[in-house]
Amino acid sequence: MSQNDQTARRPRGKTKLPADGFSGRSRRARTEPMAVRPLRDGRYVVETDSGTYVVDLQNRTCTCPDYAIRGARCKHLRRVAIEVTEGLVAPPGTTEAVCAVCGERTFVPHAEANAALCRRHRLDPGDLVRDRETEKLLLVVGRPGQRADEAVVESAGKTIAEFASNADYGDHEPVVEAVYLDSLRADTAPDELDRYRFPASRLRRLARNRGAPQYDRFGELVE
Ligand SMILES: [Zn+2]
Ligand SMILES: [Zn+2]
């Protein structure tokens, strides 16, 4: 059973986690029934039999009395950390979504939830890819963006999804921006190159090209 199956089958109410080999607060963090729900601001609501608390994993705080009195790393903080580590709830700043290519459950930044990609189908700046239609090599220069049926090509007056060459790929997939490898030259800055957008699954990722220029998450060339 994959991590994502567990997420999908997880009941919405309070649950316990296996606690063999744990003691003290670590054990109580697992054996006490709790329901953990992520908030959009990156914090978590933890519902227990004795009260409901808000945990901030990044600042390591909790609103419970145990934390307030002892400043201890309480069982709620521990429980949220365990559930994030085990893939039971979304890590801070992310949300659960379904991959637009394969339908598998995954965690992505909120901004990408509308057109998400799992780890296997995700394309990042710097990835070397081959266009399944033309067999040409390209370099990904942008993070996954709008859905193919929402991303408009102004010059053509239609969306990416409406191009005949994209008919075999999902309208709901995010578009990925890339430049043609044969247009990359030593005397050309990447931002001077024409960028083209494709439905994500039209681009097949090859082994990473170590010699290729690397881009950061803003699409900027990393020296
Ligand atoms: Zn607490
Ligand atoms: Zn996928």
Image (cartoon, rainbow, N blue to C red):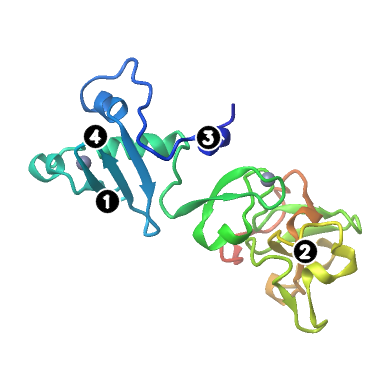
Name the N-terminal-most of marks 4 and 2: 4
Is the Cβ of the residue at disc 3 closer than 8 Å to that at disc 1? no
Q: Nearer the viewer, mark 3 or mark 4?
A: 3
What residue type is disc 4 on? Lys
Specify the quadrant that holds the C terminus: bottom right
- Residue identifier under label 2: 198
- Mark found first going from the N terminus, 3 or 2: 3
Label 3, label 2: how many angstroms apart (C-alpha)?
Answer: 33 Å
> What residue lies at 42% left-to-right and 36% top-to-bottom?
85
Element carrying mark 1: loop
Residue topped by disc 4: 75
* Amino acid on which disc 2 is placed: Phe
3D distance between C-alphas at marks 4 and 1: 15 Å
Q: Residue 159: where, in percent of width, then height?
A: 77, 74
Q: Is mark 4 within 8 Å of ligand 1?
A: yes
> Could you say which quadrant of the image residue 49 lies in?
top left
Q: Nearer the viewer, mark 3 or mark 2?
A: 3
Pick the quarter of the image with the N terminus: top right
Q: Name the spot of residue 34 as percent of width and height, x first.
A: 31, 36
Image point (48%, 35%), residue name: 10
Identify residue for label 3: 9
Question: Mark 1 belongs to which amino acid?
Answer: Asn
Residue 165 or residue 186, whichever sits in front: 165
